[in-house]
Image (tube, helix red, strand yellow):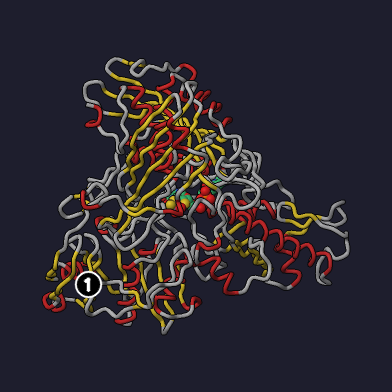
Amino acid sequence: MTPLDPTPRRGDAGDGLGARLPRIDGRAKVRGAASYALDHPVEGVAHAVIVQSTIPAGRVRTIDTRAASAAPGVLLVLTPDSTPPLRAASTWTGEAPTQPEYRPLEHTIRYTGQQIAAVVAETLEQATEAAALLRVAYDREPAVAGMDDPAAGEGNPLPPLAIERGDAALAFAGAPVRLTAEYRTPREYQMPIEPHGLIARWEGDALTIWEHSQWLDGMARTYAEWFGIPFEKVRLISPYIGGGFGSKALALAHGALAALAARQLGRPVKLALTRPQTFTAFGGRAATRQVLELGATAEGRLLAIRQRGCNETSVDGVWIEPLSSVTALMYDLPNFSSQQHLVPVNTVLPFAKRAPGENPSAFGLECAMDELAYAVGVDPLALRLRNHAERDPQSGKPWSTRRLREAFAAGAEAFGWARRRMAPGSLREGRLLIGWGMAAGTYPVRRSPGEAMVRVLADGTVEVASSTSDMGTGAYTILAQTAAAVFSVPLAQVRVRLGDSSLPRAPVTGGSQMAGLMTGAVDKAARAAREELIGLALTDPRSPLRGVANTLAVEHGHLVPPRGEAPPLPIGALLTALGRDRIEALRDTLSENGLTPEDRYRAFTTVSSMRPPTDGDYSMHSWCAHFVEVAVDEALRSIRLRRIVTAFDAGRLYNPKLAESQIKGGIIMGIGQALLEGGMIDPRQARVLNNNLADYLLPTNADVPSIEVISVGEPDPHASALGGKGVGELGIVGVAPAIANAVFHATGKRVRELPITMADLV
Ligand code: MCN
Ligand code: MOS
């Protein structure tokens, strides 16, 4: 490259932020060069296999380990009797442990599939064989299979989640139009293609763990606390992740077991869960149920919503799937009352799956809005515009940006919504009943501190380093683009290192916050490094540009005097002239000064520092509108999607190709939720029956129609340093109700429970 040759341009933004570029890690991934946690070659590794409970409640009376221990290659059998307790770790939300000890294996059984033993052997086959030889005797107790089990009862109220705004009961009673309906979503599972597992290795009191992670620092903290070693002694490594969707944010019991076994054996241990084991080794989305009462004027203006909901949790833990999260703020709604119960059942503790809360919340609300549209005879889109909220009705704060109207308009235009006729069954193609449905979605802007290191090396390479993770989202690419923009260098000149807890700190890659906060951190660090370069170039005695001007620009990776006083100098050449191999800058996005090291540590290793969307003067959210077409075979009642158009506002897009890909991924997951997914629970054993990818149905290419994605966002200066809002979870919110509404339009059948199957339409 000769100096000042324009770098290859792709789109208006070059290789910088905003350019529509493919993922820089894409080639490595498709060619098998990207190494995932379990691929890592570790000398002398032993293999662990987990054994799970076959009863839902009771106690392990005995585990006869004799045959297993004597089996070929077996090195260690861990049972509740033989496993020493670890120290309890504080929770991911930052609360101190309530008990001193943590036992990854316990006698008390709370759900089918709970881990009760582990076998470690020389080979995976030997460990698997020996695990089958364990003889477990249980004392069984009655279990609660799910929320609908008569033994489940009403559950426990959650007062902190209750919302009372205006007088919903009164307004509902006096409303000219009233609707009451119950909406339900089943247990759902994240099901990333890369199943869960890890390799643990001790060297003295230092623990290295190769484990996929949405939160390197949070998981490293948990391991450190479990084993009573300093945080710095734990190194988590996970440069690539085969999807997480919320399931890879925490250190889990099988991780504790692998690390424990490795310490006990004095050699590295690898543990991979089988696909069926992943259904109970960590929690998926909780099943939910909500009754919505909508009161409206005859023209469809909302007067009141009363919401009574519940979600499943485990018998010994609390997981909240907040059902009011969209209901409370989507529409101009003067009177709102919401209460939620938690129903403890014998399940693994549910956890976050893409848009926890917003997703089932929107399913109820956006179906109910469609029902209201039919009750008052107003087009569903017109009804939503009629109820548009000009500010957040819950916090009373103005929206930072809300281009939902624009999303409705752009989506409707691209879809051809204006041609829709209201009556169900009015569109037909031969034996196909065609239905058009729509729904809105939203996801809050969350913010935590992030930290990044930017280095400029003597060969001109710009290096970005952070412990944040890329689950397939595109973090490598957008962070490279961020640095490329600051130095105006081609992407090929930037190297990004992520997914290693020894790198600068980052909070959880959850809540769709990472792109906004890490582009901010990288931009800040890169600017600091650029300033330092310029300063050195102007003042260092060895700099060829010393004294030539009183300012310099950085263009195309060169230091450029403003009026051509001297030839442009490549940034690497300056370092060489100075005899330095690098300059570097570490910056974070913590706004508060004077944080103690302990505060900093907590900020990155717990979610205690995550700011809610209404923290500050504005209420900040991303928005979307989905328009879908379904075809229902009149005779077979099979449901096929024909096309989806989604318009969204996620502020400025750091990379439109990747943001659109995120939205498409969310939509595809929403298709699964609407038509295919759902844990089937055996009422006798409280067991997930379809615990494999043959029976737990996910959308395949053949299930996915053409998807058109349109961005209508504009930079939101309040939401993040560089103006973007989250997209990772946004796309799934509202998909299932849009599909349910389309099915209604096709068939006249209102299905209020997911997934919607042929059986619902006969
Ligand atoms: N992006 C953009 N412009 C924006 C915002 C985001 O171009 N204004 C693009 C970037 O490529 C960025 C990606 O979208 O890397 C996601 O950014 P963001 O919305 O900040 O989400 P996170 O980086 O925090 O990723 C987590 C989020 C969550 S919480 C779940 S759940 C989820 C999701 O991302 N899990 C995923 N998307 C996933 N995608 C894949 N492939 N795999 C998962 O497990
Ligand atoms: Mo996403 S469910 O917040 O990891």
Q: Position of residue 266 (x, y in %)?
A: 33, 82
Q: Residue at x 64, y 53 (%)?
A: 484
- Residue 365 falls left or right of residue 467: left
Between residue 341 and residue 138, name the one nearer to us.
341
Give the x, y percent position of residue 462. 64, 60
Q: Amino acid at mark 1?
A: His
The image quarter in which residue 252 lies = bottom left
Q: Position of residue 213 (x, y in %)?
A: 43, 61
The residue tagged with tag 1: helix, strand or loop? Answer: loop
Query: Is residue 662 visible from the viewing direction of this image?
Result: no
Mark yes or no: residue 116 visible. Answer: yes
Residue at horizontal 67%, vertical 59%?
524
Left or right: 482 in relation to 575: left
Which picture quadrant has residue 114? bottom left
Report x, y in % for residue 85.
31, 79
Q: Relative to the observer, which residue lies in front, 683 or 667?
A: 683
Q: What residue did someone put label 1 on?
A: 107
